[in-house]
Amino acid sequence: MLVSASNLELLQEAGAFEGSAVKPAFRANDTTDIWGCRPNGYGKLGPSRPFRTASLKDVAEARLSDLGLYSITFVNNVEADLRSLEAFAAFREDAAANAIKYFLEVFNPNIECDVPPESLGQFVNDNLARCLSGVLKHKRPQFLKYPYNGPKALEELVSYDPQLVVGVLGGGAGTNRDTFELLYQAEKYGARVALFGRKINLAESQLDIVHYMRLVADGGLKPAEAVRAYHAVLKEKRIAPVRALEDDIKVTEAVLQEAASS
C-alpha cells in the first residue's frame, strides 16, 4: 500500500498495519509533473523537475517503512534529463545511508518531446537502461513500476535484464475490461507485478475487482470472462455498475487494442 510519508505516520499511529500482511510503502519523491495544483497544475507546462518532500532520515528514525517509491520522467531534453538523473543518484545514496529500499517508477514523457508514438517504448527502455547501467546490486530498485507501451517494448525490457522485476502501472481508470486486459497482457509479455491505483480505487467494488484480477493473473479467466463474472457479482450484491456490460467489456485504451485477447 503506497501512501505519503505523513499519511503513513498517521496510519502507523492508528495501528492500521498491525497483524496485516499489507506492506506499507511511502512516496519518496514528488516530481513537478505530478503536481496537480488547481486550476491547471504543472503537468504539461514544462519538463519534469525533481523534488522531494519526504525525509528518508525522518522515515527511517520513525521506523515507518523501509520501502519507498522513487519516480522519474525522461523528456528527451539533455539538461532536464541530466537534472533528473543527478537527483536520482543523490536519492540512491540517501536511501542506502538510511537503510531504505525502493522501487522505481518511470513515466512516459509529460511534454511533447519529438519522440514518435511508435518509438515511445524504445525511448523509455533506453533511458531506463541508462539510469541503472552503473548501479550495483545493493542500490538497484527492488522492482519497477513501468508504463505499458505494448508487447514489444515490455518483452524487450524483460529480455534485456532478466534480473529486473518489471511491474506495470495502471494509469487511468478506463473500463473494467481495460483493467483485466492490461493485467493479462502485462503478465503474458513478462511483467511480474501489478501496481494499480485508480483502476482499483474507482471500481464499483474494490475487493471484487482485485479477486478477479488475481484470477486473470493466474490464468483462471480471460479478460472478457472476468468482466462478465464481475458484473454478475455486482448484480448479486445490488451494486450499480458504472457502465452497462456491453460498454464495460470493450477495450478502450489504444495501447491494449492491438494485442487484445479474444
Image: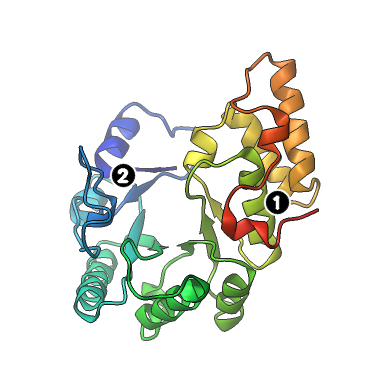
Q: Indicate the amino acid at tag 2.
A: Leu
Q: Which-is-in-front pick, marks 2 and 1?
A: 1
Is residue 167 toward the left or the right of residue 103 in the image?
right
Q: Which quadrant would the N terminus be assigned to in this image?
A: top left
Q: Is residue 209 above or below residue 96?
A: above
Kindly identify the residue that appears in the image at 31 percent across and 63 percent down: 111
> Which image quarter: residue 249?
top right
Q: Residue 67: x and y, percent?
A: 38, 54
Element assignment for label 2: loop
Is residue 229 toward the left or the right of residue 256 in the image?
right
Q: Quick one: label 1, few (<14), some, or many (20+) residues within 10 Å?
A: many
> Which image quarter: residue 190?
bottom right
Q: Indicate the amino acid at tag 1.
A: Ala
Q: What residue is shown with label 1? A: 217
Element assignment for label 1: helix
Kindly identify the residue that appears in the image at 47 percent across and 43 percent down: 197
Q: Nearer the viewer, residue 250 or 34?
A: 250
Q: Residue 201: x and y, percent?
A: 49, 34
Q: Is residue 220 above or below residue 130?
A: above
Kindly identify the residue that appears in the image at 49 percent across and 76 percent down: 119
